[in-house]
Image: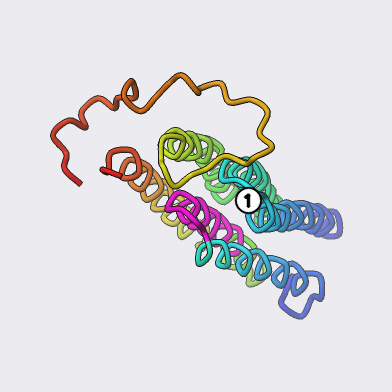
Amino acid sequence: MDIIRDIGTLGFILVGTLFILIAGLGILRMPDLFLRMSMTTKASTIGVGSLLIACMIYFDDGPSVAKAFALLIFIMLTSPVSAHMIGRAAYHDKDVILWNKTHADHFKEYTQTSHYLSGSENIDL
Amino acid sequence: MSFANPFVLTTFSALMLGFGMAFYRLLLGPSLADRVVALDLITSLAVGTIALFAIATDTEPLLDVIAVVALTSFLGTIAFAYYIEVRKT
């Protein structure tokens, strides 16, 4: 049984590390903020998720598995939300320029003036 | 599973390589949003490293540390996104 546990742990560690390495390569080499974000969010979510699954297999008692599973759910829920927030904010940022080979830009007509965040009128940053 | 295991050493090296690439983007990033994305990736990598460290040293309580780091990373990213959205130019 110990051998099976070790093999499962090592397999999930291998998958997770590969995906994390892909995320690193993506953030280094992709030409555009949004392409970079698509790499890092997906790859790092799957990578960290498999490392946590490896934790669940390795610590095979009830409380540890429950804790690791709760963390997995938390990361799977929060990582896309934060990526969506950054992408939404960065699209109207003047410093962020799209890649010159971008095919589809569906929000061209959606200009800065019609962009409105409720509750931000009185904030002066 | 221990640090003497060459497989564990290799995975730690790969994670450190990822850290290096993310830090390079953090220094280089042309805009603030790039840096925020790089910081987000760095905290994800920290979570992965802590999970691997918990397995390598057989210390189960490190899972609590993962919870704290993940929560802080999420709140920090949301705060940065809000700042990018409402700042003037």
* Label 1: chain letter: A
Q: Quadrant of residue B11?
A: bottom right
Q: Was residue B41 drawn as part of the magenta stretch in this picture?
A: yes
Element type at mark 1: helix
Question: Could you tell whether A69 is left or right of A53 in the image?
Answer: left
Structural crowding at the residue carrying mark 1, measured as other residues with C-alpha within 10 Å and reported as few (<14), some (14–19) or many (≥20): many
Question: Could you tell whether B82 is left or right of A5 in the image?
Answer: left
Q: Residue at x 72, y 72 (%)?
A: B13
Q: Which residue is mark 1?
A: A48
Front residue of A30 and A62: A30
Q: Residue at x 79, y 75 (%)?
A: B5
Residue B1: x and y, percent?
A: 74, 70
Q: Was residue A92 drawn as part of the magenta stretch in this picture?
A: no
Specify the principal SS of the magenta part: helix
Residue type, mark 1 in image: Val
Residue A115: x and y, percent?
A: 34, 24
Q: Residue at x 71, y 77 (%)?
A: B3
Is residue A74 in view from this perspective? yes
Is residue A60 in view from this perspective? no
**Residue A16 in the image: above or below residue A89:** below
Number of marks present in the image shown = 1
Q: Quadrant of residue A94?
A: top left
Q: Quadrant of the N terminus of chain A?
A: bottom right
Q: Residue at x 34, y 38 (%)?
A: B85
Front residue of A13 and B31: B31
Describe the colour scheme in one phrase: rainbow
Q: Quadrant of residue A100?
A: top right
Which residues make up the magenta segment?
A: B29-50
Residue A118: x and y, percent?
A: 25, 25
Question: Could you tell whether B60 is left or right of A120 in the image?
Answer: right
Residue B6: x and y, percent?
A: 81, 75
**Residue A40 in the image: above or below residue A107:** below
